[in-house]
Amino acid sequence: MFDFSLCVILDQDWIGGKIDQSLIADIVQGGATWLQYRNKNGSDAEFVRNAEIIVEIAHRLHVPVLINDRTDIALASGADGVHVGQQDLPVRFVRTLMGPDKLIGLSVSRLEELKEIDQVNYIGIGALFETRSKPDAELSGLELVQQVRSRTELPLVGIGGITSANAANVIDAGADGVAVISSVLGAENRKYAAKEVLEAVKLSKRRNTHERL
């Protein structure tokens, strides 16, 4: 069963330079349950080259990888799936290209964007809080997580400004996991930063499970 608890988004602008095994190993050892690779500004050649490297390393560490936006690069790199936004290829076409066994995630920042969700495996919701990764992002807030939770049983992943200090609030609102960039990639000790976020997520899940019993 796929564990959505903690996604670390490997944003090329935050990584900088060459992808190496130590970076990914630190994040995975810290507790990332899956990874996503995003490259908004690089060439297609750089994107697919780095995607292949990340997929190869992550799979050796038994962690799945999704590619942000680019269905073609997800297929070319052997990734486990793709995460698309509202301005990307419609998910019905993404599903046709990816096939039935690959994971597809869809970004949602407002309720009216909940379309064709029968074709996706999870929904990413945000930006929930102010974030250094997307300083101009429209904030959706935790209320949107609650609203989407009431409309679907699909796994929900909160994104945008999430840290160890607020990750539990995202889970309490109804999310199944969180996705982070700066709170891990911008940390001096990436392994420890990932561990802190995951512990906050797990603590909230345990508490919520106990309260339901």
Image: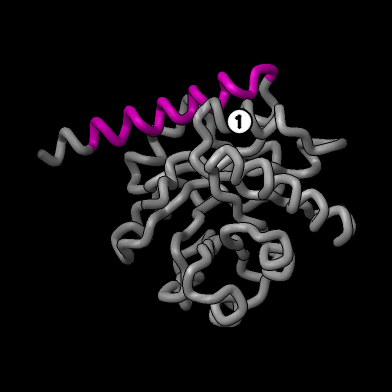
The disc labelled 1 sits on which kind of residue? Answer: Ile
- Where residue 44 sits: x, y (%)? 86, 61
Residue range highlighted in magenta: 188-208
Is disc 1 surrounded by few (<14), some (14 to 19) or many (20+) residues within 10 Å?
A: many
- Where residue 56 sits: x, y (%)? 68, 47
- Where residue 92 sits: x, y (%)? 54, 81
Q: Height in image: 197 above or below 101?
A: above
Residue 64 vs residue 87: left or right?
A: left
Residue 129 visible in this rendered orientation of the protein: no
Tell me the quarter of the picture where residue 187 sits: top right
What residue do we see at 60% from left, 41% from top?
Answer: 60
- Where residue 24 sits: x, y (%)? 66, 34
What residue do we see at 49% from left, 22% from top?
Answer: 196
Q: Height in image: 18 above or below 89?
A: above
Residue 165 vs residue 55: left or right?
A: left
Q: Secondary structure at mark 1?
A: helix
Residue 163 vs residue 84: left or right?
A: left
Q: Height in image: 69 above or below 135?
A: below
Magenta stretch: includes residue 62: no
Closer to the camera in the image, 26 or 111:
26
Residue 92 vs residue 10: left or right?
A: left
What residue do we see at 66% from left, 60% from top?
Answer: 78
| Image quarter hosting the C terminus | top left
Tell me the quarter of the picture where residue 81 sits: bottom right
Residue position for label 1: 27
